[in-house]
């Protein structure tokens, strides 16, 4: 695994597979899947209300452990969610670089917890690849 892994943060709950996984697939193509840590790869269910309390704990603690081993994060808060903004705060506290796919109406909280505001997933990938010097990222190579 690359020394500079990138965590893919964005809504999963009540999302279709296209909504939850589409942009993540794009990021993996642009950065190289081996450079990405995707919580959806470990565990994804469209409706978290079906999880037991012990599964809730496993999900959150697993996400936090995954995030802590990363150097960067792509945040794609394309719709309101609970986990994504919390992951942004943890990333900031742990000094993990955050590239956020932002819109004109992104909240002050999203902007404040971002190191870079990107107009697209591709732009966020490119910025992180340069900042973290990920030389084998296809977005840099190609």
Image: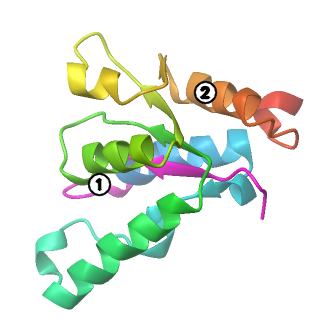
If you read the primary sequence from the N terminus, does the residue marked by circle 2 or circle 1 appear first?
1
Report whether 124 appears left or right of 128. Answer: left
Q: Which residue is mark 2?
A: 122
Magenta stretch: dominant SS?
loop
Above or below, 90 relative to 123:
below
Question: Mark 2: few, some, or many residues within 10 Å (few <14, many ≥20)?
Answer: some
Q: Which residue is mark 1?
A: 16
Any part of residue 142 in sight: no
Task: Give the residues in magenta.
Answer: 1-17
User: Are dots 2 and 1 in contact, CB under 8 Å?
Assistant: no
The quadrant where residue 45 appears:
bottom left
Q: Is residue 93 magenta?
A: no
Which one is nearer the viewer's eye here, 34 or 115? 115
Residue drawn 31% across and 36% down? 77
Q: Quadrant of the N terminus?
A: bottom right
Above or below, 4 relative to 64:
above
Q: Quadrant of the C terminus?
A: top right
Report whether 65 appears left or right of 10. Answer: right
The image shows a total of numbered marks equal to 2
Residue drawn 50% across and 22% down? 120
Above or below, 34 relative to 42:
above
Q: Position of residue 43 (x, y in %)?
A: 40, 74
């Amino acid at each position: 695994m690359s020394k500079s892994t990138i965590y893919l943060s964005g809504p999963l709950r009540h999302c279709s597979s296209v909504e939850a996984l589409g942009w993540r697939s794009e990021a993996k193509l642009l950065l190289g899947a081996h450079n990405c840590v995707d919580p959806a790869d470990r565990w994804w269910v469209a409706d978290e209300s079906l999880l037991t309390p012990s599964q809730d704990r496993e999900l959150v603690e697993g996400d936090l452990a995954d995030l802590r081993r990363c150097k960067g994060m792509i945040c794609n808060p394309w719709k309101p969610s609970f986990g994504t903004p919390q992951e942004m705060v943890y990333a900031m506290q742990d000094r993990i670089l955050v590239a956020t796919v932002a819109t004109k109406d992104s909240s002050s909280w999203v902007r404040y917890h971002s190191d870079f505001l990107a107009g697209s997933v591709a732009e966020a990938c490119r910025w992180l690849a340069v900042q973290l010097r990920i030389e084998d990222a296809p977005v840099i190579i190609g």
